[in-house]
Amino acid sequence: MNFWAYLKTKQFRINLLLAICSVFAVILIVFFSLGIYTRHGSGIPVPQLKGLSIEKAMDLLKDQGFQYKIDSVYVLDQPPGSVIEQDPDAGTNVKENRTIYLTIVTRLAPPIALPDLEPYTYREAAAIIANYGLKIGDTISRPDIANHVLEVRFAGQPIKAGDKLPKGSRIDLVLGNGAGPSEVDIPDLVNQDFSTAKFLLKGAGLTLGVVTYEGTITDSASTVVTAQTPAKTDSLNKVSIGTRINLTVSQGKKADGAN
């Protein structure tokens, strides 16, 4: 029989229909068989474990026939030994004896190497400290022309970059106030050359006040300081920055051995 003629017969159409129905039936059987085999849609709901202590979480899982595996991580401001993550999530239906993965807060803080903070201002240092999992305790201001971190302390002791301390620790910062010291030592200018005395005053942050000349001055390049006001004494050895120092000078040279 011609093949193309056979395709037009009733027998071919019946055979084709039977073949399609057979394939469809096989698909249905496989689908429902897998559902029965895997108990699709049935199982035991996973309990809520987040927030529980690890001891309570383990007891609960054992009672309900679950296995478990535990990982740990350090988290600031979270109680040590508590569950912070679980997989699968609470309420998920799973088979009995399924392994539940738990993440708990470790009881021991990992050591952190102190970063170098001294080149940075307070705001910059605060950002770095937070990124390293540390906290700022007290801040102490110290007279200094710099306005950045001068020193870092932990438990009252100075520490340096690279020293190890527990994550979450509070560290104290000593900061320069950007203005420098408000008072400076009074220099001893007596018996100094007048030019040297002016240089020392400028270096100390003081101001040259009234200059009184004693006797006849014939050579201004050879004058020496004979008195100053205020002078350094046991009761007065510091003055405010910018204080005017009055000098008395006379003709002469710096005596041998004078500073």
Image (spheres, rainbow, N blue to C red):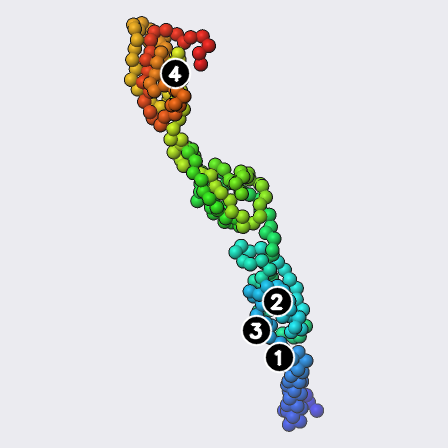
Rendered position, 192 above or below 60:
above
Q: How many C-alpha atoms fall within 10 Å of the one at disc 1: few (<14), some, or many (≥20)?
A: few
Real-space Cα distance between discs 2 and 4?
79 Å
Of the residues tagged 4 and 3, which is closer to the observer?
4
Q: Dot 2 corresponds to which residue? A: 56
- Tell me the quarter of the picture where residue 68 sits: bottom right
The disc, 2 or 3, on the residue closer to the chain's N-terminal end is 2
Report the front residue among 197 and 52: 52
Q: Which mark is residue 189?
A: 4
Residue 95 shown left or right of residue 178 in the figure: right
Task: Identify the mark nearer the N-term, 1 or 3.
Answer: 1
Three-letter residue code for mark 2: Lys
Q: Residue furthest front?
A: 235
Camera-nearest residue between 180 and 56: 56
Element class at badge 3: loop
Residue 217 placement, left or right of 25 = left
Residue matched to label 1: 42
| N-term mark: 2 or 1 | 1
> Which structural element holds mark 4?
loop
Q: Position of residue 234 (x, y in %)?
A: 41, 21
Percent across and percent down for residue 259 are 44, 14
For disc 2, the neighbor class at 10 Å (few under 14, some 14 to 19, many from 20) is: few
Residue at which label 3 appears: 91
Label whose residue precedes the other's in the sequence (4 or 1): 1
Q: Residue 189 location in percent, x, y?
A: 39, 16
**Residue closest to the eye, 141 or 38:** 141
Task: Say what amino acid the circle numbered 3 marks.
Answer: Gly
Q: Are marks 4 and 1 in contact (CB under 8 Å)?
A: no
Tell me: residue 190, above or below residue 39. Answer: above
Q: Residue at x 48, y 46 (%)?
A: 137
Marks 2, 3: nearer the viewer: 2
